[in-house]
Amino acid sequence: MGPVLLALRLVLAGVFAVAGGAKLADLEGSRRAVAGFGVPERLARPLGLLLPLLELAVAVALIPTDSARYGALGAAVLLLSFVAGISVALARGLEPDCHCFGQLRSAPVGWRALARNLALLAIAGFVAVAGWDDAGVSATRWVTDVGAAWVVAIAAALVIAALIGFQVWFCLQLLSQNGRVLARLHGLEAAVAQLSGESVPSSGPAPLGAGLAGGGLSVGAVAPGFSLPAVGGDEYSLEQLLSGERPLMLVFTDARCGPCDALMPYLARWQDDYAGRLGIALIASGDRERNVAKAAEHGIEPVLLQTEREVAESYGANGTPMAVVIGADGRIRSPTVAGAEAIGRLVAQATAPALTVMQVPSGNGHRHGAEAAPAPRVADAPPIGGPAPELVLSNLDGDRVALTDLYGERTVAIFWDPDCGFCQRMLDDLRALEGALPAGAPQLVLITSGDPERVREQGFRSQVLLDPDGDAMRAFAAGGTPMAVLIDERRIGSPVAAGADAVFGLIHDATAARTANGRGR
């Protein structure tokens, strides 16, 4: 019985160690998963951190014989809570993302997840009961059977392995941060050129996927070919999807994937908005009828059906939703990225028009006699100094509000999504700013997509307007969240600022400019 108990303890310890470590590496995903099971937002964040810590503690306690009984008991309690949460969700017809193993494997809960947790619960219960007085063979006794020199050598090897692992992780984080910095610098150069009228040397646009964690096939590799039936019955090959000059984004989804369902309206909108710049095709797995219903509900096509996950695996897409961009030449153009937020940023990068920076005459007399060139701007964006878009949106109480009624005051319109991770990170600072707006600060108006109740829970003091179909975002050429733009005297007063730092910088600059002019709000 001793060796059997040891083997079962090691199995449980391995499962909990992997699950806890993966969740700890993706705390935002862990928070979203906890919230998906109905936990209030104010408790989801601390529980999202506490859960992986408890799982790691259980994994550690299962190893030594003396603490194994308590580790097994803790495992049983956690698994029992998982079983209860999954059962309640299934009974209510919900399929939240379990995030069981973080970004390693995340899928909507279902009967398989329930069966897996019940099996692990049975193992934990057996170890706790059968091994309460004697938890079996020690997993660490072999240490006492080797000489001191071997113990030192093994300890040194573990330290070296940990240092190497940390260095690899640090380098990956550094590369990711470097990509974000390059992308931001590119945007700042464009903004400076637009405002100053000076040409700025450019090294070209940032590569697709810059600043995004991703994997899959190497950029530049030949995209694996396939031929799959669509939900409408037609057969599509990769060559057919690539016909034309535009790149193609493959989005891998699953019929029972909750995050995929949340992404569907955005995919439909992107297909309409960027039809001339980016092709989007869904590669779906799972129940055919569900996939057919989703395609019909959102008007998305083509939605191609793979038998298992053969196409997804050939592209290195080991979860859903994930996406990759393929060039018109049939070669991989981006890493394979995971999650709705990363996919949205990849779409924004893939559809960003090429920026042409023009030389305009400056106010110091250079280029005398030259005719002023128009200021460069992003295609379809309202020009700086042009009239602000006139739309009518609903507020959280359901009342209709005309944007023109708000333009009487200088306004910073902030484009928001309560489920956007970048929005979440700036939430506390934004609410603090709302509570202490300095003299001369513009009024803040949040224009938000996503669940209105989630926005209500975030407790904004500013006016909140709902933009469920993205009409306002398109009108202001805001390609993601968080973004912001200044409206001054009913006209566009700034380029669109992208990212938390740029949004706060826009508010600060608008406040400083008004204060410097000696004008009140």
Image (spheres, rainbow, N blue to C red):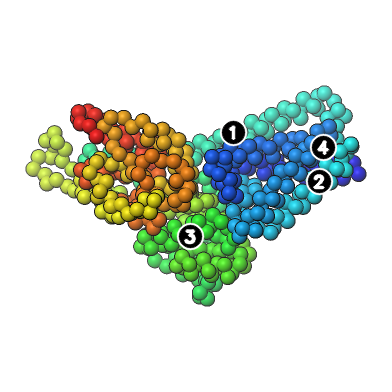
Nearer mark to the viewer, of 1 and 2: 2
Mark 2, secondary structure of its residue? helix
Q: Residue furthest top?
A: 148
Work out whether mark 2 precedes mark 4 in sequence or the reverse, and give the earlier one.
4
Separation of disc 1 and disc 2 at Cα? Answer: 39 Å
Work out whether mark 4 precedes mark 3 in sequence or the reverse, and give the earlier one.
4
Separation of disc 2 and disc 4 at Cα? Answer: 10 Å
Q: Residue furthest right?
A: 1
Determine which residue is flagged by label 2: 125
Determine which residue is flagged by label 4: 69
* Badge 2 density bin: few <14, some 14–19, many ≥20, Cα 10 Å: many
Tell me if residue 244 can be seen: yes
Q: Residue furthest bottom?
A: 233
Give how far across and how far down residue 284 sits, in percent: 56, 64
Q: Which mark identifies residue 264? A: 3
Query: Considering depth in this image, is 17 or 85 the residue closer to the camera?
Result: 85
Nearer mark to the viewer, of 4 and 1: 4
Mark 3, secondary structure of its residue? helix
Determine which residue is flagged by label 1: 167
Q: Amino acid at mark 4?
A: Arg
Q: Amino acid at mark 3?
A: Met
